[in-house]
Amino acid sequence: MTVYVYAETAFSHEGSKQYLLELVSSLSMSGCQGVKFQVVINIDELISIKHPEYTNIKSWCLSLNDWKEVFEYTINCGLEIILMPLDILALS
């Protein structure tokens, strides 16, 4: 039987690209095969500005360029990527 282990990052990075890169590095040393990223770039497509956590969640969004850097780093660490796009720009 083959078992594949993928890590889920969700929003644990809370907008810190550096933390996310360190997490990916740790995951590559853990023996898992890949990482699932939930990606939102344009928060307005995900939640209403009236949501009580709007400002907080908005601060957790990385830019498209930041995500590209994270994805490149993840691949260079030998990990596969599962992408869960949460807005249209995340498909770019």
Image (cartoon, helix red, strand yellow):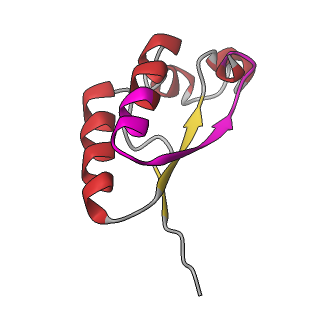
Instruction: Please tell me which residue is depicted at 33% across the width and 36% down the height of the picture.
Output: 20
Tell whether 70 sits left or right of 16: right
Query: Residue 25 at what x, y percent from top left?
Result: 26, 45
> Please, is residue 6 above or below residue 92 in the view?
below
Q: Nearer the viewer, residue 42 or 48?
A: 42
Tell whether 61 sits left or right of 13: right
Q: Nearer the viewer, residue 1 or 62?
A: 1
Which residue is the extreme one toward the bottom?
1
The N terminus, quarter of image: bottom right
Query: Residue 83 at what x, y percent from top left?
Result: 62, 39
> Please, is residue 53 above or below residue 6 in the view?
above
Query: Residue 23 at what x, y percent from top left?
Result: 29, 45
Instruction: Please tell me which residue is depicted at 38% across the width and 26% down the height of the picture.
Output: 15
Q: Is residue 48 magenta?
A: no
> Please, is residue 46 above or below residue 34 in the view?
above
Q: Quadrant of residue 44?
A: top right
Instruction: Please tell me which residue is depicted at 65% across the width and 27% down the height of the picture.
Output: 51
The C terminus, quarter of image: top right
The magenta span reads: 72-89
Q: Is residue 73 magenta?
A: yes
Tell whether 68 sits left or right of 88: left
Query: Residue 87 at what x, y percent from top left?
Result: 72, 24
